[in-house]
């Protein structure tokens, strides 16, 4: 149980376009979803936390107008990278948990590799 | 600021040898610490959390508040232990979030 999927697993887009990444909890209702970014050979950095039905809370330094997060249902959150640039190329990972806040175990998705040309 | 430090980016040991992955943290208050593991081509998954005080796949980790450490240990390494290991803590002051260390890539040589 507690499986999280991401789609697509990899995407290549041209500079200036937008790309949407989906994160789904397949067998449980995810009250909270988290979006992380991971650069090569570096650790995961939290970008934002979203609770179902409310606005996402972004980490300092993360542009909310650039990285649009929507958590419209208990099983789906989306991250849209708007007007993507090559520096947005990265590995994006989502996680989901049953409860509010970080006290609950997070189940991670497999990640999405974004390459902006 | 809360921080997790894993001083070793790479660690290589022989099969059957003891292994210790180091993790130090800085946190004001009572921390809640975790070890996550990522096997090749697999997603990140929770290995163990200090409040559980359990042994998973032969691994244990003891929280040492005096030394602010949470080292991961296994007495006899197996080849299947080769993976990327991340130490993490929950930050509950201010914005609640998991703070990850840089990770240690463990390679078990046959």
Image: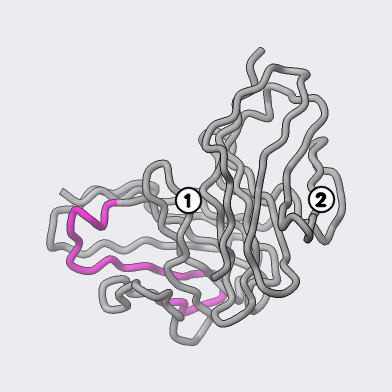
Residue at 51% x, 55% y: name it: A5
Q: Residue at x 65, y 48 (%)?
A: B23
- Percent x, y for residue A92? 40, 55
Residue A76 is a magenta residue: yes
Chain letter for mark 2: B
Report in which chain the residue with disc 1 lies.
A
Residue B66, picture quadrant = bottom right
Q: Answer with the quarter of the image where residue A19 lies.
A: bottom left
Quadrant (top left, top right, bottom left, bottom right) of the C terminus of chain B: top right
- Res B42 → quadrant: top right
Residue B55 percent coordinates (x, y): 85, 44
Q: In this view, does A23 lie above or below A54?
A: above
Quadrant containing the N terminus of chain B is bottom right
Q: Which residue position holds label 2?
A: B62
Q: Distance between the residues labelled 2 and 1?
A: 22 Å
Residue at horizontal 21%, vertical 64%? A18
Q: Which residue lies furthest to the top in this view?
A: B110
B43 in magenta: no
Residue B89 in the image: state x and y as whole percent. 65, 62
Circle number at residue A43: 1
Q: Give residue B28's position: percent from left, percent from top.
A: 67, 73
Q: What stretch is highlighted in magenta?
A: A70-89
């Amino acid at each position: 149980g507690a499986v999280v999927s991401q789609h697509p697993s990899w995407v290549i887009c041209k500079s200036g376009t937008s790309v949407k990444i989906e994160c789904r909890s397949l067998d449980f209702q995810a009250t909270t979803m988290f979006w992380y970014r991971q650069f090569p050979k570096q650790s995961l950095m939290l970008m934002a936390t979203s609770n179902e039905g409310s606005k996402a809370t972004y980490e300092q330094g993360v542009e909310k107008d650039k990285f649009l997060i929507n958590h419209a249902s208990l099983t789906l959150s989306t991250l849209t990278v708007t007007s993507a640039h090559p520096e947005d190329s990265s590995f994006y990972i989502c996680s989901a948990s049953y409860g509010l806040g970080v006290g609950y175990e997070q189940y991670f998705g497999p990640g999405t590799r974004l390459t902006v040309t | 600021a809360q921080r997790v430090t894993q001083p070793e980016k790479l660690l290589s040991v022989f099969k059957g040898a003891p292994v210790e992955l180091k993790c130090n943290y800085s946190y004001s208050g009572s921390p809640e610490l975790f070890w996550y593991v990522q096997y090749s081509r697999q997603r990140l998954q929770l290995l163990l959390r200090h409040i559980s005080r359990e042994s998973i796949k032969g691994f244990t980790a003891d929280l040492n508040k005096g030394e602010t450490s949470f080292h991961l240990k296994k007495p006899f390494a197996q080849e299947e232990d080769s993976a990327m290991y991340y130490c993490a803590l929950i930050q509950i002051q201010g914005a609640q979030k998991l703070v990850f260390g840089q990770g240690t890539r463990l390679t078990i040589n046959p």
